[in-house]
Image: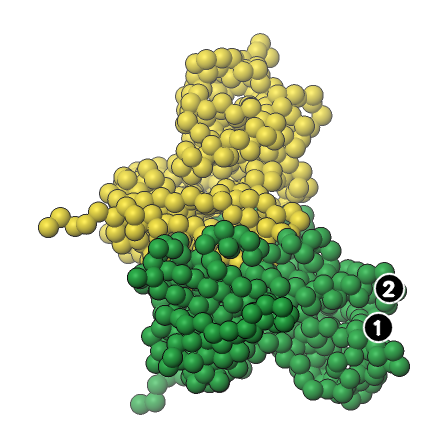
Chain colours: A green, B yellow
Amino acid sequence: MTRRIVVVGGDATGMSAANTALRHGGSASYEVVVLECGHYTSYSACGIPYWIAGDVTERDDLIARAPEQHREAGIDLRMRTEVTAVDLDKQVVSFRAVDGDGQDGELEYDDLVLATGARPIRPPLDGIDAEGIFGVQSLEDGEAILDDLTGRDLRRAVVVGAGYIGVEMAEAMLRRGLEVTVVDQAPEPFTQVDPDMGALVREAMEGMGMTVLTGTPVEGFDVGDDGRVRAVRTGDATLPADVVVLGLGVRPNVSLASEAGLTIGESGGIATDVRMRCVGHGNVWAGGDCVQTHHRLSGRGVAIALGTHANKHGRIIGTNLAGGYGAFPGVIGTAISKVCSLEIGRTGLGEAEATAAGFAYVTATIESSNVAGYLPGAEMMTVKVLAEQRSGRLLGAQIVGRANAAKRIDVFATAIWNGMGAEEMTFMDLSYAPPFSPVWDAVLVAARKATKAVEADSPASPA
Amino acid sequence: MTRRIVVVGGDATGMSAANTALRHGGSASYEVVVLECGHYTSYSACGIPYWIAGDVTERDDLIARAPEQHREAGIDLRMRTEVTAVDLDKQVVSFRAVDGDGQDGELEYDDLVLATGARPIRPPLDGIDAEGIFGVQSLEDGEAILDDLTGRDLRRAVVVGAGYIGVEMAEAMLRRGLEVTVVDQAPEPFTQVDPDMGALVREAMEGMGMTVLTGTPVEGFDVGDDGRVRAVRTGDATLPADVVVLGLGVRPNVSLASEAGLTIGESGGIATDVRMRCVGHGNVWAGGDCVQTHHRLSGRGVAIALGTHANKHGRIIGTNLAGGYGAFPGVIGTAISKVCSLEIGRTGLGEAEATAAGFAYVTATIESSNVAGYLPGAEMMTVKVLAEQRSGRLLGAQIVGRANAAKRIDVFATAIWNGMGAEEMTFMDLSYAPPFSPVWDAVLVAARKATKAVEADSPASPA
């Protein structure tokens, strides 16, 4: 008997689940229907800043697989089709044609996969719907920005929010020749790293010619008679703006799940078990930006919107749908970004996160070069490590540097994933040759300093 | 009471041990005497190819700390002083002045540190002592090569041996404008990786304009009337050569230890316990290129000459000398190299090593790009993984690629160090952003393919 799998959302998680299930299970066993409300499938949202910057010339380069390719693989893919409701008891989804020229209807499912992604945060500020103010979430957003920038004489860009998308879009605007101001309410940019590391990011961004205004909440936008944004208003000032980019982060898109009565976790994402089954519903699966995942260090539920998790979730769901066993092992908050030549990496817990999780910890910060110091082009990076008091277990690491700096965060990620202590890490057998690192790689130097900090700091247990 | 520590050898291990002991123990507790037969202390032998190539312009740039700096730190450093014998019962070393103008004599010790390094392999081939044939071990070697190359019109360089030093010196000679031929008796160059990966290295070297002759043992050297090398003779051919570089690897320099009666391990290096104490002698320590270390995967003793191990050994010895506790956790054979734009990394066991250690294993080889495929400058790398049959435990990994490829070996090194399986690694939280990797990083793709290979290959246990 053929089981029908209905997938809501045709991006990373949804299409990966659909393809994996079909590949392992076969189309004789499964009928896979994917309902996608947008125009595109399987695209790289993370690539949009590089498209705006001009590194990527064609929109289609950001599309890993077009609808036709999915259909050729045997998937019944229905584009511009929005799912409006799920009835978990009847096992039915209701959908409508977004453009009005398709069919509305209902569809029964044996298994349901929710891959509804995330929604950009868009505070209800005065003037936020003016022309010239853009989000950066979908390929449609990217097209709108490019259309707006092309053939106009825009001089001043203001980027609201100095997180991943914010700094990457700031680079894109700078490289397109605009004057760039980045505004954020936090004390330092890039709050994914601690403020002391964020200060290094600020310095570097200022060195690139950007204006960075932190501790500065945006209060609204001045709009011209033509309906176009003219300026960004903060408490302190009015910043003239020809174009504004919003990079305020995203929230899990759980309205469908929530209305259907599925459990939403403390982080705001759909709660699932390790196999990505929605709590209490063995035939309803969810993954990607819309779910809550387990943080291996804090033990808490977190919602982290990232293509790499979304792809893994999709594969795990697909494996399970096809009768295999797949379990998602959780996350540790690894991330990486680049602003022009500046590289930023982080993994594990930052100081505020470690404190919130209840850890007592020490920190160690070091500077080291990316290659042997005597080679031309050697550049310094700063590495900060958090280790648990007494045990010395690694809790987090952050790197800010230039070329070949930030990808080293994966070594910390792997060490933290495995519960390593700072001391053991210090003597780990990592690669060395002069064009790749000093004889003590930066990560080892940082681990060594963290070991000393643990030794110096740890109080004895009370008697 | 002041204890006297006598250190034989003033490079990485010896000076690191001396400095660590003094820093932790204090000069009131310890008198530290270092005897070094050469002209230099604490230099980067690994940097010599980059000095020859011209990246490093001053010899002194390769010296991390000059003799005066060590003396200022309180070390009684005696240069050009060769230790000729050790009497373990009397706790006395005998030494002689190399240049004949110093003092010969004897010195009692409370603790002895042997850091005698390695000796380059130099087979007794016909003509090997001719002018124009160079090793690449010491700064003196580097000076000799540079003197020879400077102001002469040399056209053809032959490099004998296609290991680390061989390929790095081949690059250096190529960049100095010489025609380069690399000769090795093995079937493919760079036997630190498996032959299938070595074939990629060969292709790349040939693409750079080098001639690579493998399966070709060198039988001798033709020498001109002026005493200078003219050609390299192999079984098949006579290769004209204006200059010859020997890159045949090194062996632990254990003559002093051996004559003193210390235990030499199966690998040819001095046998020590985990604290780097020579077997059966609680006050005799050894580290660096002259010792045998424990391979964490094979469980066997290996001798690996590498500055990173040497520095770690020195620090551990110094910590122990000062009354602390330091233990060397062993190695897993991690290494990295570069030939022009080609990067090569390896960790764990290669196929021959895995077989010799008794493992049954599967392999998986994948190609992936160094950054998101849609970005300009994306370049492919090849990643090979060995995983144990049935258990799926990672046993080894090898990477051959271009920019930003080989340092990924550290992720495998950290995973293998921690005994991870291929399947768990597949879902590990590594960093992702388009300028740093595809959404599935190459190491995850390789782990995924290895997982499938384990599933497909593993035979059931006999009933």
- Mark seen at residue B283: none
| Chain letter for the residue marked with disc 2 in the picture | A
Q: Secondary structure at mark 1?
A: loop
Q: Nearer the viewer, mark 1 or mark 2?
A: 2
Q: Is residue A352 above or below residue A382?
A: below
- Residue B44 on image: x %, y %: 55, 45
Q: Secondary structure at mark 2?
A: loop
- The residue where tag 2 is placed is A152
- Residue B202 on image: x %, y %: 51, 31
Q: Is residue A13 above or below residue B362?
A: below
Mark 2 closeness class: few <14, some 14–19, many ≥20 residues within 10 Å: few
Q: Is residue A43 above or below residue A159?
A: above
The quarter of the picture where the N terminus of chain B appears is bottom left
Q: Picture quarter containing residue B290?
A: top left
Residue type marked 2: Arg
Residue type marked 1: Asp
Disc 1/disc 2 C-alpha distance (Å): 10 Å
Q: Are marks 1 and 2 in contact (CB under 8 Å)?
A: yes
- Identify which residue, B107 or B332, lies in the foreground: B332
- The residue where tag 1 is placed is A242
- Identify which residue, A407 or A253, lies in the foreground: A253
Mark 1 vs mark 2: which is more N-terminal?
2
- Identify which residue, A66 or B328, lies in the foreground: A66
